[in-house]
Structures are given as C-alpha cells and as structure tokens.
Amino acid sequence: MNGLSIIIPTYNEKKNLKILIPKIYSKIKIKKFEILIVDDDSKDGTKQLLNKMLLLFKNLKYLSRKTKPRDLSKSCVLGFNKSKYNNILVMDGDLQHKPKEINHLYSIFSKKHCDVVVGSRNLFKKRQKGLSFYRLIVSILLVIIVNILLGFKTADPMSGFFIFKKKIYLKNKKFLFNRGYKILLDLIYPSRKKLKILDINIDFRSRGSGSSKINYKIIYFLVLIIIKKFFLRVSNIFN
C-alpha cells in the first residue's frame, strides 16, 4: 500500500514520547501514514502512557518486544514486519530528530524516486548539538571504516533517521545480521542491487530526557558487524 510507516524503536523514553508523538501528529502532512512504537520492554511507564495515547491518536500502534537481549535492530525489524505501507521511515524516540523533517525526507524520497533517503548529520562539516565530542569522534571514525571496508553509499551510514522502500528489507532480510544499534548500515550493505541513496542534511538536536544508550559494548559489536560484512563482501566477489 502507498503511504508511510513510521517506526520508532524505544527503551525507557516515556518523557520524550509524551512530547514526540503529539508533535509528529501536529507537523505531519502525509495523508496515509501510521506510527509504530516498538518498545524494548521499558520499565519507566512507557506501556501505560502508550495505552492512553492509543485512544487519542489515530493510526498509532504499540508493539512490545519482551525477548532478551534488548536490541534496537531487532525492534526495528519487528516494526518492519508489522508495517502495512510500502515505504518505511525510522527515527529515534529521544527527540533528536525533528518531526517536521519527516515531511521533507518523504517529499524528496517521492519526487526523486529514491530507494533510500538518509537524514545525514553532516559529521565532517558541522558540529551537531546532539553529539558530544566523544560521540562525534567515534561516529566519524566508524564512517571512515565503513567507507574503506564496505564502500561509500551514504555520508552517514550510522544515521538513525532515514526512509526506504520496504521491498529492500524484504529482498535482503535473510542477509541481515539483525543485531546492534545501527539498522541502516545493516539494511543497505547486504544489497547486491545498486541502490539510489540520497543524503539530506538534518539538524541533529540534543536528546530530551534520559541518557544515550551508546556504550563501549555497542561500539565493539558494531565494529564486529562491519568486519563481518567486509569478509562477506569479499567472499561474494570471488564466488
């Protein structure tokens, strides 16, 4: 079906969702859309909040993922499988992505007939308020590693704000690692078909309440995924 499924993976983002969801509904200009909140078994009252919001907002859906370990990619994939539209947008639930930019990404995506449009943080040119110096350096280093080992496809393969055709997931889901906190990287690099990917610079804001989920373990696992994808890419070349 033509339209847009907005997937928002969350964990303990109750205070942010209370602001984010009404803001999306007040800013969105897309006629056919749905919002799927995929929660990783939060303990902060997120479930109670969303059950109330389901009565107030049309086309809002709540999915709870109770299987351990907690994992953003697995939450996104659950949302992909449950989505009803053929275009999917992923965004964070921590208020770092502006709801009004959903319209801009979707407009470019539709007019340019793209496979993927990435909300790029423009890491190499602009210091974003939402990134600490440590996260900025780590993000830049990871982007450089991805570009060297896997080839350049987007200026920000670590972005958590992007829109893509659902068929990309359906065609490549058997190749996904389906783990980690950077689902965009996992989605676009298994594809054997050349994808039309366009970067749109966004204003990456500071998160609302709570703290970032990024830690050394997540970074280590992300590097491991990149290395595995590199060896998979090399094996595909010679097979």
Image (tube, grey):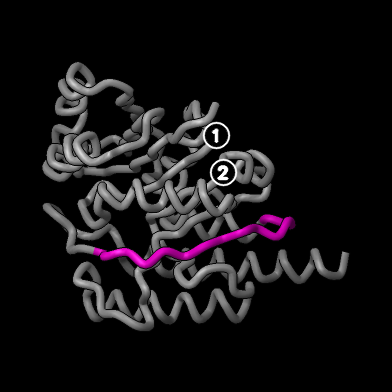
Residue in the picture at 15% in, 45% down: 16
Disc 1 element: loop
Q: Amino acid at mark 1?
A: Asn
| Side of 162 where 58 appears, left or right | left
Label 1 Cα crowd, 10 Å radius (few <14 / some 14-19 / many 20+): some
- Checking the image for residue 170, the label placed there is none
Q: Quadrant of the C terminus?
A: bottom right
Q: Position of residue 203 (x, y in %)?
A: 26, 65
Q: Amino acid at mark 2?
A: Lys
Q: Earlier in the sequence, mark 1 or mark 2?
A: 1
Q: Is residue 36 left or right of residue 24?
A: right
Residue placed at 31% from the left, 37% from the top?
29
Q: Which residue is mark 2?
A: 165
In the displayed orientation, state which residue is furthest to the right.
239
Q: Secondary structure at mark 2?
A: strand
> Residue 100: x percent and y percent?
26, 49
Side of 115 where 138 appears, left or right: left
Instruction: Report if the CB atoms under discs 1 and 2 are less than 8 Å apart.
Output: yes
Range shown magenta: 191-204
Q: Nearer the viewer, residue 231 or 116?
A: 116
Q: Quadrant of residue 45?
A: top left
**Disc 2 packing (10 Å; few <14; some 14–19; many ≥20):** some
Which residue in the structure is indicated by mark 1?
A: 86
Q: Position of residue 175 (x, y in %)?
A: 67, 50
Residue 43 visible, this orientation? no
Report the side of 238 relative to 105 (left or right): right
Residue name at image x 27 percent, y 21 percent: 58
| Residue for point 20% across, 43% down | 12
Q: Is residue 193 magenta?
A: yes
Does 38 appear in magenta? no
